[in-house]
Amino acid sequence: MKKTKMLKKNYEFRQVMTKGRYYQGKYIACFIKRNNKKYNLIGLAISVKAGKAVKRNKTKRLLRENYKILEENMKLGNSIVFLLKKHVDINNINFNNVKEDMEKIFLNANIK
């Protein structure tokens, strides 16, 4: 299993979110931009308004783990930023809901 590479810098997030294409599911939204590298980069952005740190970190772990499962079947060379939608109650998110959303987004984006 390979280590997932993450977006870390503010300018990297900004670049993907301004120049990337927008896709959305029921619980998460996603910006995807080609990066011309031999690997994918992901970034996770969850608003402070979504909940306290423990709940935000739990949601990030859910997103990261679902991505790792789906990563093996994906095309390489993309930068992806995942956002939690504003209307979503962070307590009602579970593993399967996030997985279904990600699969739907990746199929729409044609990177799976």
Image: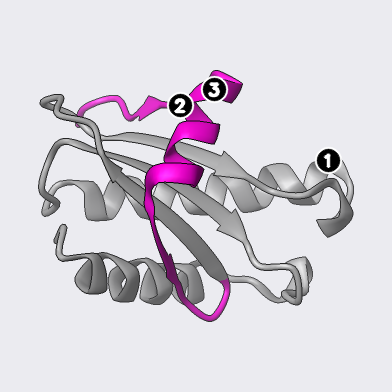
Q: Which of 108 and 98 is in front in this view?
A: 108
> Which residue appears at 72% of the width and 74% of the height?
88
Instruction: Assess disc 1: are there few (<14), some (14-19) or many (≥20) residues with their C-alpha within 10 Å of its C-alpha.
Output: few
> Which residue appears at 22% of the width and 47% of the height?
71
Highlighted magenta segment, given as a residue range: 1-27
Q: Quadrant of residue 9?
A: top right
> Which residue appears at 29% of the width and 70% of the height?
103
Residue 75, position in %: x, y? 10, 48
Above or below, 24 relative to 43: below
Which three-letter amino acid code belongs to the residue tagged 2?
A: Leu
Which three-letter amino acid code belongs to the residue tagged 1?
A: Ala
Residue 7: mark: 2
Question: Of all residues shown, which one is farthest toward the top?
Answer: 9
Q: Which callout, 2 or 3, points to the residue nearer the camera?
A: 3
Residue 26, position in %: x, y? 53, 81
Q: Is residue 5 covered in magenta?
A: yes
Residue 53: mark: 1
In contact (CB < 8 Å): disc 2 and disc 3: no
Residue 112: mark: none
Residue 11: mark: 3
Q: How far apart are marks 1 and 3 (CA)?
A: 23 Å
Q: Which callout, 1 or 3, points to the residue nearer the camera?
A: 3
Which circle's residue, 1 or 2, is located before the other in the chain? 2
